Amino acid sequence: MTMTATILDGTETARELAERTARRVKSLSDRTGQTPCLATVLVGEDPASVTYVRMKRRRCEAVGMRSIKVELPDTTTTKQLVDQITTLSNDDSVDGILLQHPVPKQIDERAAFEAIAPQKDVDGVTLHSFGATSLGLAGSGYGSCTPAGIMHLLKAYDVTIAGAHALVIGRSPILGKPMAMMLLAADATVTIAHSKTQGLGELAKQADILVAAVGRPRFVPGEWVKHGAVVIDAGYNPGNVGDVDFESAIEHASMITPVPGGVGPMTIATLIDQTAIAAARRRGIDPDG
Ligand code: NAP
């Protein structure tokens, strides 16, 4: 039986989240006289990364937040990058730090991430943030933005997570792993699949919530989607193609994210909102107050 799936509209949900962020920023600026500020760090000139950083800076402006940019050549060493990020970590006028990744191969990305002060890790990339996510410690650390944005989207559409069987395909440090931890913290029964997983199609058919975070175009065919499942496509491949075969998956799903217009806008909106939250916390103010 064919379902009429609800499209999970990330563009609209991100717009609503940005409105909340703008209110946070205004309230903070009025109360403290200081405008929250995101520092973006870009190493090299990868065209996709240049575009992402520009989009993030524009979103800052749209909610009334400041941003400063640091641009480094693609010959930058780990030490030079760590020193630069440490300077931002110690700069009292900076509330959040985004290191655009991937970074050039000669750089130790983990070392660079760990130079971000935990209270400024608004992209949720440090060991501290992952630990806080894994232990379910809201209020300490920040969620990795893509999975945190997905959780926001699921909640916005009243998806029942507790007791659901969630399958996360992918286990990267910024996406699959924190996604699995967040779903677990929300009481889902979680399965994590990766490149060595056997019988993936059969596992997928048992999933009430299926998150594809693989990086392979149309990797998940519609026949893998359980009748009535909620399908989240975190993939973003060249040509605006996701990791799910949307046309066939929509025949089986009850809810599904489009690509583009699903997970992508939520990621950026979450980054900007977490920067406003970080600014409030650093000033000892309740971000929701
Ligand atoms: P990644 O670091 O390359 O990780 C991909 C994961 O997929 C790995 O865990 C890998 O397993 C797994 N995988 C690869 N082939 C597989 C297979 N045949 N069967 C099962 N699992 C397989 O990628 P990522 O950074 O997590 O990104 C994933 C996708 O999300 C990409 O399309 C990326 O563009 C997109 N993305 C979107 C946003 C956004 O804002 N919309 C943000 C970040 C990423 P192993 O661990 O075994 O290698």
Image: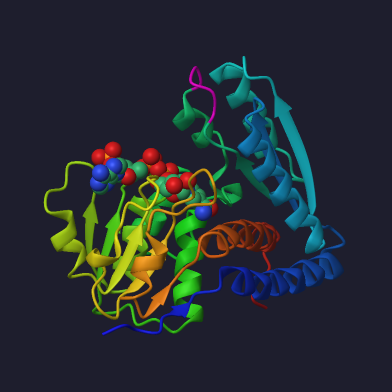
**Residue at the spot 55% in from the left edge and 33% down from the top edge:** 115
Quadrant of res 271: bottom right
Q: Residue at x 55, y 50 (%)?
A: 123
The part of the chain drawn in magenta is 103-107
Front-lying residue, 273 or 261: 261
Residue 1 falls inside the magenta stretch: no
Q: Secondary structure of the magenta portion, mostly?
A: loop
Q: Is residue 262 left or right of residue 282?
A: left
The image quarter containing residue 187 is bottom left
Horizontal side of 278 relative to 222 (left or right) equals right
Q: Is residue 180 above or below residue 186?
A: above
Where residue 62 sits: x, y (%)?
80, 61
Q: Nearer the viewer, residue 162 or 261?
A: 261
Identify which residue is drawn at 48% across, 52% down. 241
Q: Where residue 157 sits in the image (x, y, percent)?
A: 48, 82
Residue 83 place in picture, x, y as percent: 63, 24
What colouring does the structure picture have?
rainbow
Q: Can residue 286 be seen in the rendering of this structure?
A: no
